[in-house]
Image (cartoon, grey):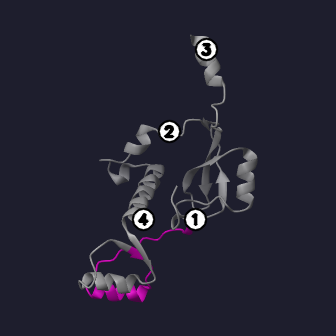
Amino acid sequence: MGAGLAARAGRRLKGIQPMKVLDLQCAHGHGFEGWFSSEDDFQDQLARQLVACPMCGDTAVAKLPSAPRLNLSGAIPASAESQGAGTPVAALPPAALQAAWMHMVRRVMAQTEDVGERFAEEARRIHYGETPERGIRGQATREQTEELMDEGIAVMALPLPDSLKNTLQ
């Protein structure tokens, strides 16, 4: 039985291509993972500036030294999903803080409507009961933001790199 399991484990699963998982870092020190079909694929995407930091959008990305590993299953370790629940923020390592920030951004993106440059107008309409209350996000100038706050309308800046303004993966 042991030899059969080893033989099956050594075969490539039908339809699943192994991915190289690389540890990457942008010029601002944000660490993240990148999954590529090969080293050539990574270098090609890097040269075309398709590899960008998910935190800040920086395309000045470097590969960090790491032990090679392949992802065959696509499974996320349970510890990555539960990290941060009940843990003081100051005690979290930078990678966990980044993961928590990304989780929060994903929730905001999923649970709000993008009203774009109409943000100030739409926030006022909601505040004054002219339209149903709902979560919105969009762009506002500093002057518009200050005016909203002077009117008692709560707003919060959430700077997002361009890479996060589209579909999140």
Circles 4 and 3: CB atoms closer than 8 Å: no
* Residue identified by numbered label 2: 75
Instruction: Please report contact status of discs 3 and 1: CB closer than 8 Å, yes or no.
Output: no
Identify the secondary structure beneath mark 4. helix
Which residue was labeled with disc 1?
A: 57
The residue mark sitting in front, 3 or 1, is 3
Left or right of 131: which side holds 5?
right
The image quadrant of residue 158 is bottom left
Q: Secondary structure at mark 2?
A: loop
Residue 119 is situated, as x and y percent measured from the top left of the image, at 40, 81
Q: Residue at x 32, y 47 (%)?
A: 85
Kindly report the distance in space between the C-alpha atoms of the residues bearing marks 1 and 4: 17 Å
- The three-letter code of the residue at mark 3 reads Gly
- Whole-angstrom CA distance, mark 3 to mark 2, is 23 Å
Q: Are marks 2 and 1 in contact (CB under 8 Å)?
A: no
Based on the picture, tell me whether residue 47 belongs to the magenta stretch.
no
Q: Give the distance between the C-alpha atoms of the residues marked 3 and 1, in whole angstroms.
A: 46 Å
